[in-house]
Amino acid sequence: MSQDMIILLVKALGETTYMVFISSLISALVGIPLGVILVTTDKGHILENLTVNRILGAVANAARSTPFIILMVAIIPITRVIVGTSIGTNAAIVPLTLAAIPFVGRLVETSLKEVEYGVIEAAKSMGATPMQIICRVLIPEAMPSLISGLTITVISLIGYSAMAGAIGGGGLGDLAIRYGYQRFRGDVMLATVVILIIQVQLVQSLGDYIANKLNKR
C-alpha cells in the first residue's frame, strides 16, 4: 500500500472519529433527557403524564423503525438547511444524530426501568422532589447500564458512519467505496474493515471498563 493511500486512510479515520464523536455527544445530550421523560411520565411514576409519554414513544418508535439509508436520503433538504450542504462529514452528522437520539432514548428508558421502584419511593418519603429523584437516585443507580447503552450507541454510529459513505458522507466508508469498491482495491477494503473492527473493539473495551468501575454491586 502506497504512502498516499496510508495518508488517505488516516484522514478517513479522523473524519469517522469526528462524525461519531459529535453525533454521539449530541444524541446523548438529547437522548438521555428523552429516556428520562419516557420513564418518569409513564403510568404510576413520579411525573405521570400518559399523553406526553405516548406521543414521545410513538415518535421514538417511528424514528427507530426507519432504515438509516432511507433516513439519510429523506432528510437531505433538512441537512442542507442546517449545514449548507448534503455531502461531507458535517452533513453526515445530521442523519447520524437523528438516528441515534431515539435509540439512546429507548436504551436510557430500559436502563432506568431496571432501578427498583422501592428506592424511588424511599426518596419520595424523605421529601425529595422529582428533579432530585432523577438526578440523585435514578441516574446514579442506573449509571453502569447507561454507560453500556451509550457504548452500544457509539458502536452503532461507527457502523452507520461507514454507511454514510454511500452518499458521500466522508470517512472510512466513503474511502472504501471510492477507492476500494469502485477501483477494485481489495487492500483498501481490507484496511478499512480492519480499522473499523479495531475502533469497535477499543470503544467496547473502554465502555466495559467504565461500566465495571461504576458498578456498586
Image (spheres, rainbow, N blue to C red):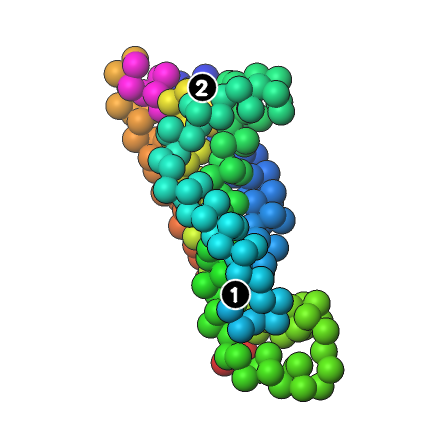
Q: Tell me which corner region of the image, top left, top right, bottom left or bottom right, holds residue 70.
A: top left
Category of crowding for the residue at label 2, using alpha-carbon neighbours closer than 10 angstroms: few (below 14), some (14–19), many (at least 20): some
Element marked by disc 1: loop
Q: Which residue is mark 2?
A: 168
Seen in the picture, residue 112 relative to 180 is either above or below; the reply is below
Residue 206 x/y as whole percent: 50, 56
How many labels sit on residues? 2
Q: Tell me which corner region of the image, top left, top right, bottom left or bottom right, holds residue 84.
A: top right
Residue 16 x/y as whole percent: 49, 33
Seen in the picture, residue 199 relative to 15 is either above or below; the reply is below
Category of crowding for the residue at label 1, using alpha-carbon neighbours closer than 10 angstroms: few (below 14), some (14–19), many (at least 20): some
Whole-number angstrom distance, CA of label 2 to CA of label 1: 41 Å
Residue occupying image coordinates x 45% and y 63% = 110
> Which is more N-terminal, label 1 or label 2?
1
Query: What's drawn in magenta, residue-wise?
Result: 176-182
Side (left or right) of 124 relative to 103: right
Residue occupying image coordinates x 57% and y 19% = 80
Nearer to us in this view, 69 or 120: 120
Residue occupying image coordinates x 63% and y 74% = 137
Nearer to us in this view, 142 or 212: 142
- Does the segment drawn in magenta span residue 23? no
Looking at numbered disc 2 in the image, what kind of residue is underneath it?
A: Gly
Side (left or right) of 130 relative to 73: right
The rendered magenta stretch, by its main secondary structure, is classed as helix
Residue 212 x/y as whole percent: 49, 69
Would residue 22 be seen by someone viewing this image from the given angle? yes
